[in-house]
Image (tube, rainbow, N blue to C red):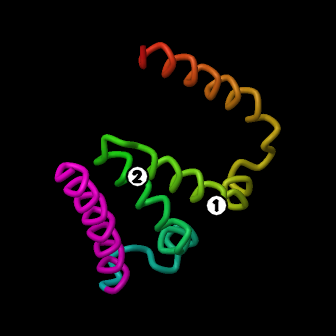
């Protein structure tokens, strides 16, 4: 039980640390604050993705990280499609990657 609690604290700590670094870079004007990419990075929807990544890296149980990542990606879908442009060109390769990943994970779990 203590290990899971420590993992949670570590994941939350990493998220807070990352947000602090982002805020410090913004306040000190070290980062390109006016750029569109930086504005997207400090948006609240990106914070969900940052938290998801920290939970996926730290915790042995990846459920919370996966849920947060899917939520973050769904909230960012408009931006993702904007950068991809013609998303139809990416549908087949992404489908193959997802299907292959499912097969690989299935084999590795046994």
- Left or right of residue 32: residue 21: left
Residue 104 position in % (x across, y down): 51, 17
Tell me the magenta residue range.
Answer: 1-27
Please say whether residue 15 is one of the residues in the magenta stretch: yes
Please identify the quadrant where the C terminus is shown.
Answer: top left
Residue 7's mark?
none
Name the residue carrying label 1: 76
Q: Are the residues flagged by discs 1 and 2 in contact, CB closer than 8 Å?
A: no
Q: Secondary structure at mark 2?
A: helix
Residue 45 magenta? no
Q: Nearer the viewer, residue 68 or 45?
A: 68
**Earlier residue among tags 1 and 2:** 2
Q: Which residue lies most toward the bottom here?
A: 27
Question: Camera-side residue: 9 or 18?
Answer: 9
Q: Secondary structure at mark 1?
A: loop
Q: CA distance from mark 1 to mark 2?
A: 15 Å
Q: Would residue 74 appear left or right of 52 to someone viewing this image?
A: right
Q: Is residue 5 above or below residue 98?
A: below
| Residue 71 image position (x, y, % from top left) | 59, 57
Q: Does 110 sit above or below residue 86?
A: above
9 left or right of 87 in image = left
Label tally? 2
- Residue 69 vs 9, above or below: the answer is above
Q: Main secondary structure of the magenta part?
A: helix
Residue 56: x and y, percent? 38, 46
Other-residue count near label 2 (Cα within 10 Å), few / some / many at <14 / 14–19 / ≥20: some
**Residue at x 49% of width, y 22% of height:** 105
Residue at (45, 52) in percent of width and height = 64
Corner quadrant of residue 90:
top right
Residue at left offset 31%, top offset 41%: 60
| Residue receiving disc 2 | 53
């Amino acid at each position: 039980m203590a290990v899971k609690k420590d993992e949670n604290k570590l994941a939350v700590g990493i998220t807070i640390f990352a947000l602090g670094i982002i805020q410090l870079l913004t306040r000190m004007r070290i980062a390109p604050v006016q750029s569109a990419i930086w504005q997207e990075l400090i948006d609240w929807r990106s914070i969900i993705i940052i938290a998801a990544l920290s939970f996926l890296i730290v915790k042995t149980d990846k459920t919370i990280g996966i849920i947060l990542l899917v939520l973050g990606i769904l909230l960012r879908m408009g931006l993702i499609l904007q950068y991809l442009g013609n998303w139809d060109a990416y549908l087949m390769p992404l489908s193959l990657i997802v299907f292959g990943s499912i097969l690989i994970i299935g084999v590795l779990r046994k």
